[in-house]
Amino acid sequence: MSQLNIKPLADRVLVEPAAAEEKTASGIIIPDTAKEKPQKGKIVAVGNGKIDEPMTVKVGDTVLYGKYAGTEITVDGGDYLIMRESDIFAIL
């Protein structure tokens, strides 16, 4: 992965969403229109945190986040989400 020229501010993180599932457990192929938005991804950049709240996630962590969390952005041809650390539910 190439180095990104983006640095989130304060308590924000940049997440690369995981790919949507292509097949069900039984082997049925899911069409593009029926695929659900993934709710997990990998942290690729973190801000410095707030003065009284240090960041608990770090680059490389795989996290679970809310279904509608964050703002979708495209940087260097890749799709990412930028969100506050409080939108993250868990570190996997």
Image: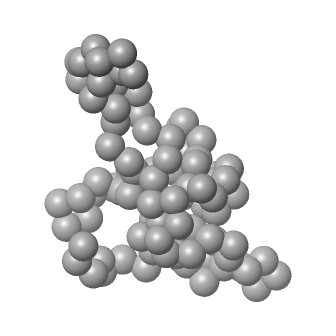
Q: Is residue 14 depicted above or below 87 in this figure?
A: below
Residue drawn at the location 50% of the way across and 41% of the way down = 39
Q: Position of residue 22 (x, y in %)?
A: 27, 29
In this rendering, position of residue 80 left or right of residue 86: left
Q: Position of residue 91 (x, y in %)?
A: 63, 58
Quadrant (top left, top right, bottom left, bottom right) of the C terminus: bottom right
The extreme left residue here reads 77
Q: Is residue 86 visible?
A: yes
Q: Is residue 87 depicted above or below 42 in this figure?
A: above
Q: Is residue 54 depicted above or below 87 in this figure?
A: below
Q: Position of residue 29 (x, y in %)?
A: 24, 18
The extreme front residue here reads 26
Residue 11 placement: quadrant: bottom right
> In front: 61, or 9?
61
Quadrant (top left, top right, bottom left, bottom right) of the N terminus: bottom left
In this rendering, position of residue 62 left or right of residue 92: left
Residue drawn at the location 30% of the way across and 24% of the way down = 23
Residue drawn at the location 59% of the way across and 41% of the way down = 66
Number of numbered discs: 0
In this rendering, position of residue 29 left or right of residue 49: left
> In front: 11, or 63?
63
Residue drawn at the location 32% of the way across and 43% of the way down = 19
> In front: 9, or 63?
63
Q: Position of residue 27 (x, y in %)?
A: 29, 18
What colouring style does the render use?
Answer: one colour
Residue 76 placement: quadrant: bottom left
Q: Is residue 33 visible?
A: no
